[in-house]
Structure formats: C-alpha cells, structure tokens
Amino acid sequence: MPNQSSFVQGATNNKNYPEEEHDTMSGEYDPRAVANLLLDEADRLGIKITNLALQKLLYFAHADDRH
C-alpha cells in the first residue's frame, strides 16, 4: 500500500477542478478528489467498493483529518 504522502499528493493534484476552487477550501482536501483517489486505488488492487463503503471511507478519512 502506498504511503500517506502519495495519497495526499493525489488528492491535492487533481486537475479536474479549477484552481480557484482549491483556494476557497482553506487548506482542506477536495472530497471529490479523495473519493476518486480511493476508487482508483481500489480499482488498482482489484477491490470492489460500493457507494455505501465509499461514503464510510470518506467519513473515516474526514474524521482522521480533523485531529
């Protein structure tokens, strides 16, 4: 599994969203980019992720980011 810095880099280097949108997020990660990153990693590992599982993973990732 990749280290945490590669996940952070993937979540912040998303080119699908305008740069000014990132500026208004006050340092937080774009949840769509994090979701896409989780889905890409699951696909790479051959793991199927349901919508509910993705929502739970995002919830835990958000909670971990808050401490």
Image (cartoon, helix red, strand yellow):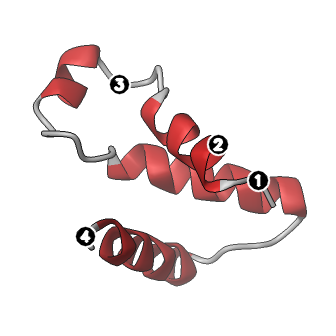
Q: Residues within 10 Å of mark 3 (few under 14, many from 20)?
A: few
Residue depicted at x 61% and y 58%: 38
Mark 2 closeness class: few <14, some 14–19, many ≥20 residues within 10 Å: few
Q: Position of residue 19 (x, y in %)?
A: 27, 16
User: Is the C-beta separation of discs 3 and 1 under 8 Å?
Assistant: no
Q: Secondary structure at mark 1?
A: loop
Mark 4, residue position: 66
Q: Residue at x 35, y 24 (%)?
A: 17
- Sequence order check, earlier mark of 3 and 2: 2
In percent of width and height, residue 46 lies at: 89, 65
> Marks 1/4: CA distance?
21 Å
Q: Label 3, on which residue?
A: 17
The C terminus appears in which quarter of the rendering? bottom left
In three-dimensional space, the C-alpha distance between marks 4 and 2, rounded to whole angstroms, equals 19 Å
Residue 42: name its quadrant: bottom right
Q: Disc 2 marks which residue?
A: 6
Report the residue at 45% width, 43% height from top. Answer: 33
Circle 1 residue: 2
Q: Position of residue 29 (x, y in %)?
A: 33, 46
Mark nearer the N terminus (3 vs 4): 3
**Would you call the spot at circle 1 few (<14 residues within 10 Å), some (14-19), or many (20 or more)?**
few
Q: Amino acid at mark 2?
A: Ser
The mark closer to the camera, 3 or 4, is 4
C-alpha span from label 3 to label 2: 19 Å
Query: Do callouts 2 and 1 mark residues in contact (Cβ within 8 Å)?
Result: yes
Q: Is residue 36 left or right of residue 24?
A: right
Helix, strand or loop for disc 3: loop
Give the image location of residue 28, x and y in percent.
25, 47
* Residue type for callout 4: Arg
* Real-space CA distance between mark 3 and mark 4, rounded to the nearest whole angstrom: 23 Å
Q: Residue at position x 59%, y 45% from top?
A: 5
